Amino acid sequence: MSGNHLKIVPENYVGAPNVEQLPAIIDIRNFSLSIHNQKIFEPLSLPIYRNHINTIIGPSGCGKSSLLHCITQLQSSEFNTQGSLLIDNVDIYQESVDLVNLRKNIGMIFQKPMPFPMSIRKNFSLPLKEHGVKNKYDIEQKMETSLRSVGLWKEVGSRLESQADRLSGGQQQRLCIARALALEPKALLMDEPCSALDPLASKTIEELILGLKEKYTILLVTHNLAQARRIADFVGFMWYHQNTGKLIEHNWANIIFDSPSNPITAAYVQGLTE
Amino acid sequence: MINIPGSSHPIDQILKALSWLFGILILGYFFYLTLNIVSHGFSGLSWGFLFELPENAGRQGGIAPMLVSTVIMLILCLLISLPIGIGSAIFLSEYTQENQIFTRIIRESLIVIASIPSIVMGLFGYAFFVVKLNLGFSLLSGALTLTCMVLPLLIRTIEESLRSIPSSHRLNAQALGLPKWRIIFELLLPMASQGILLAIILSIGRAMAETAALLYTSGYVMRMPESIMDSGRSLSVHIFDLSMNVPGGEQAAYSSALILIMLLFGINSITLVLNRIITKRSVS
């Protein structure tokens, strides 16, 4: 896969590009979240650049996962948000959005792979049918294409009737990614997709993510600094202060790792905190 | 599950002996009960016993009307209680929070209903279905009363099996854009099918065994019922009547009991086979 993903930063560059310089598919502007009057994270602004691997790093409890949940509105009714969250220039918290469509466009991968305890085929046909792919042939086509794109076709193509939850952890996670890709999303949100996997399976997923950015926009939340260093184009660093998360810094990955402007970031990326 | 290997510690040894003893006790009890009924009841069995009308207050003849009444009431009871049971279980597990006051009141009242003695339930059935709703002594009144009796069990068992599904499956399905109704019907209910089947088996057992509640509601005439508004005698009521009120009816009582047990066994086996087929179909 391409190792030449955008890590080279223009000479006189100071901050992350603005959305005029680099198009963002998701644009988070002054967006904050509280649950039951408890502030989860302070207002933050974060563009998620198209066809790049955007990552968010930071300690547990700083609101990274909650932010992902906000993007696909996977929150419960107690969530209280402020500011705006634009997806393709539509503020999904101002205008009424079709949730089914929103979640088709923004795929979500969770920490623990959870394929439905059904056959591999049914794992695809269930969501595809919901999104209007009713024809059996089309379903087969989309399933094969997405299984191929995650490198799973060779492994499971001959046994699509077998139970998806009996696959290995790494295969299950790739299946979940394939299942999301089958809906042809614009962006893929990944919430620590490798943390439940062994190093080899993680490596496969990482390579897969690198390959995916050509077609998709990736927003990856990770604890694993080494992983972020290996694959990220952009890094947002979140920290918490008095139980409230805060975006400390957002920039090109190599700037965050090599010359961060905030001392907390510097300490965190050098492994001096936590 | 893997058993922990025992040690030579004396308490371990005693515990081991005791658990074996209790295990054998249960097995012995089961075999004694079954053998007792089989040995007493088997000689009275014949095709005639199954398909003929009773004669001489049930001492002679068959049990055809009782079988028909029992099956009709069972089917009616399941037809009424399953939609209500699955619906309420879905409500409790998918539309309310576990520790909301409203949910807790429902759950507590279900426990109360479940522990009401069947004779009291029979009185309620008589007052409400037979008299107030004017359904008379009928199979329908009996089936409705049985429904009242099995609902708590049905709801609780189905609710438990829905709740035992990890919530991450719901989150995953939501993230794929599936609407709630589809998540419930195409993901959660198939996943809970084992629990639903178990609930049905338990309910059938409960309903077939029920005697007291039916005395006041479906009545105890031995005629062949002609409609669900007809009165009819269930097998369990028949056994009760033969053994308590009919001198010389013991043989027929034992044979009817054997039929009842075989019926239960048969229904359980069919349900289990159905379960295997349903699960296979819904997951592939």
Image (spheres, rainbow, N blue to C red):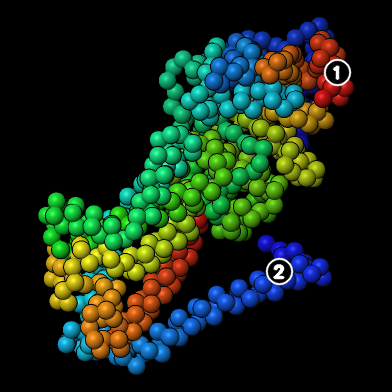
Q: Amino acid at mark 2?
A: Leu
Give the residue pinned by disc 2.
Answer: B15
The local secondary structure at tag 1 comes to helix
Pinpoint residue B188: horizontal percent, then vertical percent. 47, 48
Q: Nearer the viewer, residue A31 or B247?
A: B247
Taking the spot 14% from the left edge, 76% from the top edge, the residue there is: B223
Pinpoint residue A123: horizontal percent, then vertical percent. 54, 48
Taking the spot 42% from the left edge, 44% from the top edge, the residue there is: B107
Taking the spot 21% from the left edge, 89% from the top edge, the residue there is: B60
Disc 2: which chain? Answer: B
Vertical side of A208 occupied by A159: above or below: below
Residue B11 shows in the view: yes
Vertical side of A124 occupied by B51: above or below: below
The local secondary structure at tag 2 comes to helix
Pinpoint residue A4: horizontal percent, then vertical percent. 79, 27
How many marks on residues?
2
Give the residue pinned by disc 1.
Answer: A267
Check the picture and name the quadrant holding the N terminus of chain B. bottom right
Disc 1: which chain? Answer: A
Q: Is residue A26 left or right of residue B277?
A: right
Badge nearest the viewer, 1 or 2: 2
Q: Amino acid at mark 1?
A: Ala
Pinpoint residue B159: horizontal percent, then vertical percent. 45, 48
Dot 2, crowdedness within 10 Å: few (<14), some or many (≥20)? few
Residue A60, quarter of picture: top right
